[in-house]
Amino acid sequence: MDLSDLHLPYGVASWAQLRGLGVTQSRLRRACEDGDLRLLRRGWYATRSANTSVAAAVAAGGVVSCVSALKLHGVWIPPGPRKMHIRGREAAHRSGAHRYCKQYAPPEREVDAVDGIRTALRHALKCLDEEGIVVVCDSILHQQMLERSDLDEVFIGAPRRIRRLLDRCDPGAESGTETMVRCRLRALGMRVRVQHRITGVGRVDLLVGDRLIIEIDSVEYHDRSPEQIEKDRRRDEEAARLGYVTLRFSYRRVVHEWAQAEATVLDLVRRREHVKQLAG
């Protein structure tokens, strides 16, 4: 049996998974002798092309979980320290090591080298702040990875203050930065609509009050095409003609310079720029 014929996510698998795929002990031994597989720790193996970070997490005594697993699954993750989040077996937690992520429940049995979305999210509930939790849940809902009922189940066992965050989630949010701005403005008492459609303009990321449009870049400015930039400028021009005020916040502005951006929004709101009568 050629190992390349096996479907091994991230190139890392347990002996139980290999056995389930038809690998015999003799084939496993030959693969290790030939260098096609290497032992990471008891019962876990990596191929020659295994994902380096995933293999390192398993070799360290756990599996990839929490925000690291969510990111591998394509969930939008708030910016933070670049470290691998792993969870350990029950024995690992008893060892007193502090590098393992935990959940609001006893440790679960390891199944895959990278946890599924449900398990990863349960652990992220203890690693992320409240805004971060809403960000990842918005991303999961928007991409239809899970439904709201699934999230209700995942949140079982979490403190009430964490469970109540589900009421702040919105599947309409198209990016994490959009969620971040929405949460921050609503926390200031502003009425914010998500992905609101304006005749002649189209959908806008956020509409504060009646006429303050806020568009948010989910990536750095230089990653946007000239065509997209020109399209955005034309949209802003049409919105101005109709009497709307438009603010555009870059990824950097939202993530690293929010205090200044927030001050701009507050100044406009204090001047009632968000509720003035629109042009006919």
Image: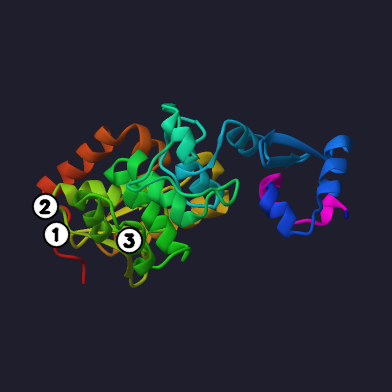
Residue named by callout 3: 239
Per the model, the C-alpha gap separating discs 2 and 1 is 6 Å
Q: Which residues are magenta?
A: 2-13
Asked if marks 3 and 2 touch (Cβ < 8 Å), the reply is: no
- The amino acid marked with disc number 2 is Arg
- Dot 1 or dot 3: first in sequence order is 3
Give x and y (percent) for residue 185: 21, 49
Quadrant in which the N terminus is drawn: bottom right
Answer left or right for 268 relative to 12: left
Q: CA distance from mark 3 to mark 2?
A: 18 Å
> Is 146 in front, or is 45?
45
Residue picked out by circle 2:
272
Q: Residue 275 shows which numbered tag?
A: 1
Relative placement, left or right, of 32 versus 56 is right
Amino acid under disc 3: Ala
- Colour approach in the figure: rainbow
